[in-house]
Image (cartoon, rainbow, N blue to C red):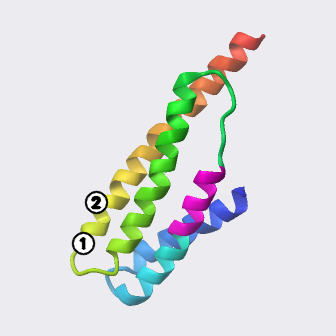
Amino acid sequence: MKYVERVAYVLLLVAIVIAFHYPEIAAYIASVGAAGIAVARFRERYDGNNTRLRRIMRIRHLVGVAFVVGAGLMFREGNYWLVAFMIAVVLELYTMFVMEHENRKEKKNDK
């Protein structure tokens, strides 16, 4: 699943780069990328007891939804899709760093 996620992020990046010159094509590319990210996010599971990591996984699901909403907004007039993508990116970065911190903390406690 990590390869699907990587390809989806590349597609989303390509769509964002070409969005201002070819908005019709970029919307379709972004839709495929956002769908890939959403599928990868909804397939992630956390079965542990750490409530913070459970909350982070729920936020990661919202990131997938935000990318899909942003891709959908690319089909409309205006640049509202930028807001959705920026929210998704900020949440993604937050969850990435918090997950890394919590995983290190769990490994340290297991020793």
Please indicate, yes or no, whether residue 96 appears anywhere in the rendered image. Answer: no
Residue located at (31% from left, 68% from top): 81
| Residue 25 against residue 85 in the figure, above or below | below
| Residue behind mark 1 | 79
Percent coordinates x, y for residue 105 in the rendering:
63, 18
Judge the density around disc 1: few (<14), some (14-19), many (≥20) Cα neighbours within 10 Å. Answer: some
Percent coordinates x, y for residue 61 in the rendering:
51, 48
Q: Are marks 2 and 1 in contact (CB under 8 Å)?
A: yes
* The one of 17 and 100 positioned closer to us in this rendering: 100
Task: Specify whether 25 is left or right of 5.
Answer: left
* The one of 101 and 39 positioned closer to us in this rendering: 39
| Residue 44 against residue 35 in the figure, above or below | above
Q: Amino acid at mark 1?
A: Asn
Q: Residue furthest left?
A: 78
- Helix, strand or loop under label 2: helix
Residue located at (57% from left, 26% from top): 101
| Residue 77 against residue 34 in the figure, above or below | below
Give yes or no for residue 36 being in the magenta stretch. Answer: yes
Residue located at (47% from left, 41% from top): 59
Residue 12's disc is: none
Residue 83's disc is: 2
Percent coordinates x, y for residue 50 in the rendering:
60, 22
- Helix, strand or loop under label 1: loop
Magenta residues span: 34-43
